[in-house]
Image (spheres, rainbow, N blue to C red):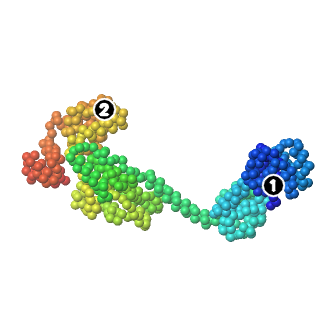
Amino acid sequence: MRIVRVAIAGAGEDGYSAYRMLKEMKEVSITGIADKDPAAPGMAAARREGVFVTEEIKDLLVEPDLDVIIEATASPGVLDFIRQNKNSGTAIMEAKAANLIISMLRDKKEELLEIKSVKSQLSAILDSVQEAIEVADINGNIKFVNPAFSRVTGISEEERINQNIFEASPDGALATVLKTGKLVFGQRTKVGGSNAEVVSNAAPIMVDGVMDGAVVVFQHFTDVMNLMEELKKSTSIIENLTDKLGQVTTSKYTFDNILGSSAEIKRCVDLAERSARSNSTVLIHGESGTGKELFAHAIHSSSMRREYPFIKVNCAAIPETLLESEFFGYEKGAFTGAVKSKIGKFELAHGGTIFLDEIGDMNQNLQGKLLRVLQEMEFERVGGTQTTKVDVRVIAATNRKLRELIRQGKFREDLFYRLNVVEITVPPLRVRKEDLPVLLDNLIVKLNRKLGKKVKWIDSDAMEVLLNYDWPGNIRELENMIERVLVTMDEEVITKKILVMHASQFKITHERDLDLVPLDEMEELMIKKALTKYGNTVEGKKRASQALNISLATLYNKLKRYIPENI
């Protein structure tokens, strides 16, 4: 590269500007700069950077190989002096023109450098992609192929470049685009000069609205099929995850939601709180409507698994034929209608808790499979062969007497003992009636908000009616009854009259207060009240017989007649 030797006459604003631009150009060597004022900005800069400086312009003109002298003084006398004393091979350029040309050259250089950088980046990208790329000009002359082209086709870059696509691969997507000017998608063909079967996409290259060539991108057909298989697998995984996200829930209640201060409920909550600190299986007994599910939620929310799923399965609500697939999931094609795989409840609950409500209604075949899960923490999906391991804490609940079901051969004894590690019996409402006021206050507040009512309290006569009722449906019955009353009333206070008017269970009680009751019906009612008060244990039955003023043997005889299941 030839170096242009330049001198500058004048170190003021124009001369200094020319000096700064020329210093950035590797192709230029500044031989010196002159100015009458030694403090001019160009003089000071040149002096700092080791460039020759002088106050006499003639000192610049003695350089024998000087190519250009830039006149930056704008003085006619200086320009005439330079013309008279310069060498014949030295050109003269005014500073303003020089600065303009230098600026244009610098901009052009930067533009070329940017183009070179973009070209390098584009080349790196094209060389790194896994798809084969081939480019041809408007006449079909092949101008570019990337390394993937050679990998897919076995044809080297040297063989392919400068061939004509209409001769090399006349039926391919690239030739088609050049002939028609239209896009080509998903064309399956063989590459000319190769046995490679590929799937191609091709498009025209447009410059200022005119087609200047075309480009094709293709993959080996085998690679495409492999990608489709991977896509199917990914789609299946995504579908399963979507199903899982749609079904996964967490606990909604804590122990703060269990209201009451009676000794019975306090004992029950204390045991539940202790069980929450372990991973032991819990079996919750209790009549329908006592709040067994509320206890299950609270145990999970206080356990170490509270950040993981809480999955509920109502064993009584799912048909027996579907219960196994609900528990363990199924593989695609396991049965008619299984168009895709499905994750089961145990798999959904991994890391968390599964709540098996109404466990006493589960069929015996599934009881055996559940026992295996509890023992080994593993299972197979319906129609599958692969064993899935899970980490799940089990909480089961029932309103049925499991020991009686075991005697009848309807419930597996080994499963019972596996479930019954921690046994919690939720007391019925009739044995914790002292909790009625706090339960009612909470219900009225909640239902006022739900129904838009303004009920303030329940009067003493109405409360006496509620306290004298045995609540066979427990807290669920209480909630439903209070909601029914609030829906139908406009008053701010619940009275006995309103209860009797709008709640059917109190109509019967109210009528029986006035009418005669058959003796055997009254006898049965008194026996049930005595057992409720003293319990169904042997000691409880002794105390009940004393309260009823009959012998224990007589009590057992009457139990056989009225309520044989309590013997």
Q: Nearer the viewer, mark 1 or mark 2?
A: 1
Closer-to-camera residue (176/121): 121
Q: Is residue 121 above or below residue 494?
A: below
Hey, what amino acid is under mark 1? Thr
Please name the residue that numbered disc 1 is placed on.
31
Q: Is residue 32 visible?
A: yes
Question: Does dot 1 land on a helix, a strand or a loop?
Answer: strand
The image quadrant that residue 315 belongs to is bottom left
Q: Position of residue 487 (x, y in %)?
A: 33, 34
Q: Is residue 17 visible?
A: no
Number of marks present in the image shown: 2
Q: Quadrant of the C terminus?
A: bottom left
Q: Position of residue 367 (x, y in %)?
A: 32, 61
Left of 267 or right of it: where is 90? Answer: right
Closer-to-camera residue (288/204): 204
Question: Does dot 2 land on a helix, a strand or a loop?
Answer: loop
Mark 2: give few (<14), some (14-19) or many (20+) Cα within 10 Å: some
The image quadrant that residue 193 belongs to is bottom right
The image quadrant that residue 142 belongs to is bottom right
For the point 7% across and 50% down, the residue is: 551
Q: Which mark is residue 93?
A: none
Q: Quadrant of the N terminus?
A: bottom right
Please name the residue that numbered disc 2 is placed on.
455
Q: Between disc 1 and disc 2, whose residue precedes? A: 1
For the point 43% across and 64% down, the residue is: 383
Left of 483 or right of it: where is 122? Answer: right
Hey, what amino acid is under mark 2? Val
